[in-house]
Image (cartoon, rainbow, N blue to C red):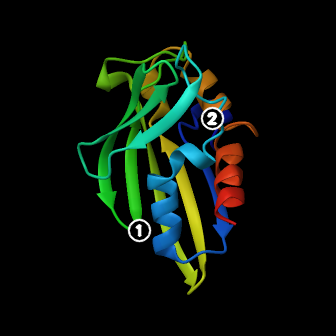
């Protein structure tokens, strides 16, 4: 038996009525339109989210004042099946400069039919955030965490 206190990852999924290629491209290229706008750590109001579509790229927010916040590194980019990015956000909801203290998010796209795709997300290695990591797990695993994000993605796509 595994205690809830030892679970170091969060999983969420959604099925969308879209071909796998479209689901992948909307998730990565159109993030600014589906990502819940209140979920950012910029000081300014969110104007855009940029996803650099390559391994070694970044995901960053751009504020209306021109400020930028690079909150993720693209660790794997395998269109249209999979993308993995770091979660460079600390327990204080600020940028985490030490990659050893960041977690990662893997998103897989699985074609269920020509116009239907299952999107499976795993936010893992959350314990790397250090003492108190459970609060990050609980936040991203809450109804307002990844479940909310994937619902917003499905709504935008639909």
Q: Is residue 136 visible?
A: yes
Residue at image point 31% right, 56% down: 77
Residue at image point 62% right, 48% down: 34
Q: Secondary structure at mark 1?
A: loop
Image x and y of residue 108, in percent: 47, 62
Residue at image point 31% right, 24% down: 100
Camera-nearest residue between 63 and 99: 63
Image quarter of residue 5: top right
Task: Kindly give the residue lying farthest to the bottom in the view shown.
Answer: 114
Q: Residues within 10 Å of mark 1 (few under 14, many from 20)?
A: some
CA separation in Å, label 1 and label 2: 23 Å
Quadrant that contains the C terminus? bottom right
Q: Which mark is residue 68?
A: none
Image x and y of residue 75, in percent: 30, 45
Q: Is residue 10 visible?
A: no
Image x and y of residue 42, in percent: 52, 19
Q: Which mark is residue 81?
A: 1
Q: Which residue has dot 2 on it?
A: 140
Residue at image point 54% right, 78% down: 19
Q: Answer with left or right where residue 58 lies relative to residue 10.
A: left
Image x and y of residue 27, in percent: 51, 56
Image quarter of residue 104: top left
Q: Secondary structure at mark 2?
A: helix
Quadrant that contains the N terminus? top right
């Amino acid at each position: 038996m595994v205690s809830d206190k030892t679970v170091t990852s969060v999983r969420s999924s959604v099925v969308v009525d879209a071909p796998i290629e479209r689901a992948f491209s909307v998730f990565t290229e159109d993030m600014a339109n589906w990502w819940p706008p209140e979920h950012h750590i910029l000081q300014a109001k969110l104007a855009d989210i940029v996803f650099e579509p390559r391994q070694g790229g970044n995901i960053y927010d751009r504020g209306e004042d021109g400020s930028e916040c690079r909150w993720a590194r693209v660790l794997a980019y395998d269109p249209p099946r999979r993308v993995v990015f770091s979660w460079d956000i600390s327990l204080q909801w600020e940028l985490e400069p030490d990659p050893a203290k960041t977690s990662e998010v893997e998103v897989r796209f699985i074609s269920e039919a020509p116009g239907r795709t299952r999107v499976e997300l795993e936010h893992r290695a959350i314990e790397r955030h250090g003492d108190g990591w459970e609060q990050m797990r609980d936040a991203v695993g809450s109804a307002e965490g990844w479940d909310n994000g994937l619902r917003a993605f499905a709504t935008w796509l639909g």
